[in-house]
Image (cartoon, rainbow, N blue to C red):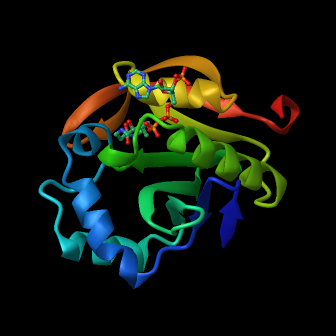
Amino acid sequence: MRLDDGVIAVRSFTEEDVPAIAAACNDPEIARWTLVPEPYTEDDARAFVAEAATAYAVVDAAADALVGAISLDRVAEGNGQIGYWVARAARGRGVATRALRLVARWGLAGGGFARVQLLTEPENVASQRVAERAGFTNEGLLRSYAEMKGRRRDMLMWSLLPTDL
Ligand SMILES: CC(C)(COP(=O)(O)OP(=O)(O)OC[C@H]1O[C@@H](n2cnc3c(N)ncnc32)[C@H](O)[C@@H]1OP(=O)(O)O)[C@@H](O)C(=O)NCCC(=O)NCCS
């Protein structure tokens, strides 16, 4: 799989991505908002690459250097659910927004999803900006919706439909 907007690309992971994944995920900001293990080892990255059939690498389109990850999973009612992180050094230049746009459109067009959605914690302002910038609609707060690392958390639900494109 490969999606490309000329600046970034989203492609399948390879074994060569393991060191970059491990380096990126040893970041408290990623540990805080996602389900990645803490601390994060190269073995964790190897297992992630081997098992995560629905997760993809986000890379610089030209250099193919890993800058993040994005996943698209089938969840309840056949909806597509997206999650992502961007390596600290690559933040603040639109990488997450570009990756989210590419994968959301791909899911709605070729992936067969009638709806793609994502969940952000109310305190995760950066991720909410990403969702907004990519055209997602905030559908409201789901109270105590998900268990993250031993604690129930409120989640904001965001969605994108084919009619939004
Ligand atoms: C959230 C995350 C993916 C954003 O990645 P990014 O590539 O830096 O995001 P973008 O550059 O596409 O930014 C999109 C918008 O968010 C804003 N933004 C980015 N980081 C921000 C921050 N820390 N605080 C406030 N706004 C922020 C940007 O300014 C931009 O808005 P603008 O276009 O109006 O200026 C990244 O910070 C990250 O990996 N965080 C840890 C993991 C995580 O939270 N994953 C999502 C779980 S739901």
Q: Is residue 75 visible?
A: yes
Q: Is residue 104 left or right of residue 17?
A: right
Q: Residue at x 20, y 73 (%)?
A: 42
**Camera-nearest residue between 35 and 77:** 35
Q: Residue at x 45, y 57 (%)?
A: 69
Vertical relation: 22 (above or below) 139? below
Given residues 21 and 117, the one toward you in this image is: 21
> Which quarter of the frame holds ligand 1?
top left
Residue 18 vs 78, above or below: the answer is: below
Quadrant for residue 88, please give it: top left
Q: Which residue is painted at 23% across and 45% down in the image?
A: 31
Residue 107 pos. (x, y %): 73, 53
Q: Residue at x 12, y 57 (%)?
A: 39
Q: In front: 15, or 33?
A: 15
- Asked whether, in this view, residue 90 is left or right of residue 115, the answer is left
Q: Quadrant of the N terminus?
A: bottom right
